[in-house]
Image (spheres, coloured by chain):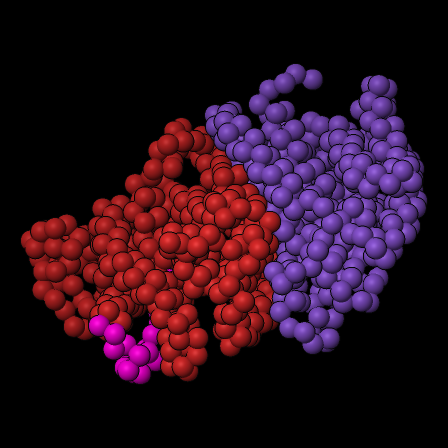
Amino acid sequence: MHFDLNTVWFVLVGVLFAGYAMLDGFDLGIGALHLFTSKDEERRVMINAIGPVWDGNEVWLVTGGGALFAAFPNVYATVFSGFYLALFLLLAALIFRAVAIEFRSKRPEHWWRQTWDIGFAVGSILSSLLIGVALGNIAWGIPIDEHGEFAGTFLGLLKPYPLLVGVTTVALFMMHGAIYGVMKTEGALHDKLRGWAMNSIIFFVICATMLTMATLLYVPHMAARVRDNPWLFSVALANMLAIANIPREFHHGNDGKAFLSSCAAIITLMALFALNIFPNLVYSLPNPENSLNIHNAASSPKTLGIMLVIACIGLPVVLAYTVSIYWIFRGKVKLDRMSY
Amino acid sequence: MDVLTLSRIQFGATAAFHYLYPPLSIGLGLMLVIMEGAWLKTGNTLYHQMARFWTRVFALTFAIGVATGIVMEFEFGTNWAAYSRYVGDVFGSALAAEGIFAFFLESGFLAVLLFGWDKVSHKMHFFSTCMVCLGAHFSAVWIIVANSWMQTPAGYHIVTRDGVARAEITNFWQLVFNPSSMERLFHTVCGAWQTGAFLVVSVSAWYLLKRRNMEFARASLKVGLSVALVASLLQAVSGHVSAQGVAKNQPAKLAAFEGLYQTTSNAPLTLLGWVDEKSEKVFGLQAPEMLSFLAHNDFHATVTGLDEFKPEDRPPVQASFQFFHGMVGIGFTLIAIAALGFLYFRNGTLHERRWLLWILVFSVVGPEIANQLGWFAAEVGRQPWLVYGVLRTPQGLSAILKANVVLTSLILFTFIYFLLFAVFIYLLNDKIQHGPDDADLKPAGKLALPEKK
């Protein structure tokens, strides 16, 4: 493995999508969980826990999409046109998630709030599920013809393995969201969320175990790199240790560290995924020779170079004010008249 | 209908709906900077009340703008995959830059703008408001750069590898400063300022008519009418500059805008009219020699007509003509409305002229429609090209799409967007009826400014 610009961009696109999963993951998790309480005030606290940040978190997806377009236009074109209906469903889900947050607080009537709360929950769960199903299909491999076009169908995307990845993603985001909620709340809701977090962890571990077995049995190419480089097993180990660390941090009352552990779990999962598909971006099944990889799907070296300059200027600035904004809004949520 | 038509309808409809909101975000962003700046400078809490009220409206438009904006980014890949492959090397970098430089800035500081009033210092909050406004403008920069590259491509070359051709960047700065990008940016941003300013004017005029929140309405009108007048006048300048650019860079488009079939010197300007595409004639009110003068600063200059282009290279004439003339007509009407409003406001008789107040109430519809018509004219006038002179529209379509699939997404999104629009209007009305919050007149705690001597 040598480091050329194409590899750098594989990593950068990966960083953007991992950033999205780590950040918007807890927003989607909060959305999936908030119907479990029927108290308006508790729902408001949960929504306001993500209120100032969800929008910025979603930008990671937008920028990831833009970076994919610019760096690997063939992947962008093949995947987005191939996953057409799934993508429009994802867009619809993300729209409902976004506007539900904004709309629900604007009227006091119960039916109004309940309607948008359901929109928020369905939007969040469906977004998580579809993102997982898409990743699952990339892992499993999708039919690609010799022109690099998707040669499958919408129903063909709903195989058991991608669906399992989808459910696992929902579980992962629920766990992540619950832990974020624990960190941001106090009192009775805090205790409730801690219970949900423990249940979500169990849900996630069951899914992850099944997914690991399924991958080893049915998707051997997704374990090939780790098989060839046993030291990479440390990434899988780090993932499990990060999950195991969450209840431990809860026990010691370190909710912030529990959340960081959950972030680490997501990053290690994304790293495992990236390590095993590299250098492909889209694995072609049944014709692996048609796979889209970091070379045959990439933009010119000139563009990748220009984009790297843009990323080097932009990303540090973005990180700086993202951190500042999380710092400004640190601590437990307090409802006031600006709140949703 | 075929896949191509459905995809074009879908892209056009989703873009048109999306573009109701960004001009509001950009324009209101500027208004917020002015209002909050005036509060910090004068200490007059009325400005604080204004900034708070318009921030709530801003949040609403911003949320829908963001939600419908992602659709646009994904649609290049879903429906126009061949286009994406062909130009991704050039076009994609502008979109990625928009994400990195504009969206993060905007959405990050939006948190402070909306929820940080008493969490950060005044200066920090004002700084955040400025950053949100700047982010909104940056996003206009990059998306106009991308679109202008489709109008006047520059800084690229066509490379063929393994029998597959595509555009690749040769010079990034030529791409950014392509022949039409800066004048079109100026034009778009002026339109956005008008939209934000006229929204403020509309709502304030409504309060005056209903004799509610009079103090608030008068102060808002002062800011709103000033910005509306300046932006509308600037818009006339930028429109003129843009049209001259079109005459130079996209002569077929200008000919379609003006319904000019024959290349002529001393070309007349049709002020209002109807194109008969069959007989290739325009009927209507004409000003002699004005088109030559406006396009080339010379009453005798020769203006290229559609006869210089093969029929298959001409844009739809009637549509381009009407969209363009509609936009220009609204533009001049807005100057008149803003000037009248400003004049009577200055001499203190505006509140007596109820007819003018009623016109002002509906004035925000003007820039919104003009923005839409302007984009229709720009995009229809570019046809039959997707990238002017480089790639034809049908060539950009995704190869594997089926008509029934596009129809499904089109119906789904038509339904969703109608729902969103209905809720938006309902909530906007709700906020307007509720009006400004009197508590904001006495900012307390961290928000209280030191007394001015």
Is A321 placed above or below B430 here? Answer: above
Furthest toward the front, the residue is B453
Is B218 placed above or below A171 here? Answer: below
Furthest toward the top, the residue is A2
Residue B411 in magenta stretch = no
Q: Is residue A162 left or right of residue B252?
A: right
Is B296 placed above or below A250 here? Answer: below
Say which of B75 and B210 sits in front: B210
Q: Is residue A178 left or right of residue B210?
A: right
Q: Which chain is purple?
A: A
Is A135 placed above or below B442 here? Answer: above
Instruction: Write down the region rendered in magenta.
Output: B347-371
Q: Residue at x 78, y 46 (%)?
A: A183
Q: Position of residue B389 (x, y in %)?
A: 35, 44
Chain B drawing hue: red
Q: Is residue A93 visible?
A: no
Say which of B438 and A38 sits in front: B438
Q: Is residue A242 left or right of residue B375?
A: right
Residue B353 in magenta stretch = yes
Q: Residue at x 56, y 72 (%)?
A: B427
Q: Residue at x 9, y 64 (%)?
A: B288
Q: Count of labels shown?
A: 0
